[in-house]
Image (cartoon, grey):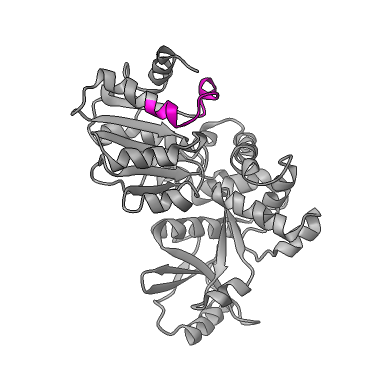
Amino acid sequence: MLSDQSIIEILGDWSFWDAAPSSGLTRQLTLPKHLNHDLALIIQGVRRCGKSTLLSQLPKHYHLALEKCYYCNFEDPRLMNDLDHKLLSRIVTLARKKISEGNPCYFFFDEIQNVQGWEKWLHTQLERPKHNYFIVTGSNSCLLSGEFATALTGRHITLELFPFSFVEYKILFPENTLENYLLSGGFPRPLTFEQPYQLLQEYFSDIILRDVLKRVHARTPDAIKQVAKMTFESCGSELSYRKIAAVTGLTVDTVKSYLEACENAYLLFACHYFAFSEKKQLSKQKKYYPIDSGMRYAITSTAGRDLGKSLELMVFLRLKQTHEKVFYWQALHKGEVDFVAVRGKTITPYQVTWEGCEVRHEKALQHFYENFPGADEAVFITRDNADEFL
């Protein structure tokens, strides 16, 4: 067991008691107006998308005194033998020895999913708040699932962070074009690294090894990588579990579990068929989209410079962040609507094409409106107007 002094030293290494953190890019993310001691702020997102940097920016955003902010990254190898709820209690106790009860104390817990029992521990803290504020991050979309989600109903605010959007990218690189962004993607560090695709390949492997492998019954990550790579290569196309199973030699159930784990790790996302009937939705094959266009280029061998697919991916990711649900729609032999975005009772079809609208796009929309006459006016996105949309 770590000594109290060792824990203090680790906290000191991660916190900013001696020097303020560098500012970094301000993310286009709507943060709550205030931190609340009875509400946990939970930030979820794929590894290396900037969650830790965002944590370091929050004291300035909320005008917090740095000496009252305690940071800890639970992937620090020095903590590997103490990753349970007792460690969290010791951190709070040590902080309170310096900051008396009645004064606010802020705890920034990075990659909290590594700590066993953290869910019930945090639940207890929020049930009986003592001027302690908790901001936590995790690399898994199922961070709030099952019993914990039920226990924390009304006691948490959850935000999802993605790699840089095109708008954020243009702030950093105003001279660059949409094509530059689609080829590089939005993961922060590779944008300034001399071999960005090499780094993105490392990210891909790291996500599968750390966030996917441990959640499925697989001895090695090789088969998972093969399944994920197939979905990256088929970006925006229907892909059946049976087809993947036939190519990989896996069972259909195994393929399904691998893809669900990859989706939980924010490595890729499923896009369902649009229908008011859930049964009809589930009867159609899903499409899959990777987390980032740059990572897709780094991982696949067949992507080439198909910028139309990359633009489609970028639009999907943006809609996913701004709408409640995103679907695709198609009529048999009558064309396809790339996306149907739903917000409340509003249904909006989107057509995405690199060069411009074609007859097939108009025909598909005509059939769509025959089936859904109450839908909003369609939005067309091309290389020429993408920056206005995004």
Q: Residue at x 41, y 74 (%)?
A: 347
> For residue 121, what is the image quadrant?
top left
Q: Nearer the viewer, residue 330 or 361?
A: 330
Residue 48 higher or lower than 374, as above or below: above
Labels in figure, total: 0
Instruction: Decide whether residue 31 is among the magenta residues.
Output: no
Q: Position of residue 374 (x, y in %)?
A: 40, 82
Residue 256 higher or lower than 26, as above or below: below
Q: Is residue 101 visible?
A: yes
Q: Residue furthest bottom?
A: 370
Q: Position of residue 188 (x, y in %)?
A: 49, 37
Is residue 301 shown left or right of residue 54?
Answer: right
Q: Nearer the viewer, residue 197 or 1?
A: 1
Is residue 20 shown left or right of residue 186?
Answer: left
Which quadrant, please, contains the C terminus? bottom left
Q: Position of residue 4 (x, y in %)?
A: 40, 15
Is residue 161 shown left or right of residue 293?
Answer: left
Q: Residue furthest top?
A: 5
Q: Position of residue 312 (x, y in %)?
A: 54, 60
Q: Nearer the viewer, residue 26 or 320?
A: 320
Q: Is residue 291 visible?
A: no
For the magenta stretch, what is the residue range? 75-89
Is residue 255 shown left or right of residue 373?
Answer: right
Q: Residue at x 36, y 42 (%)?
A: 123
Instruction: Decide whether residue 76 is among the magenta residues.
Output: yes
> For residue 24, what is the image quadrant?
top left
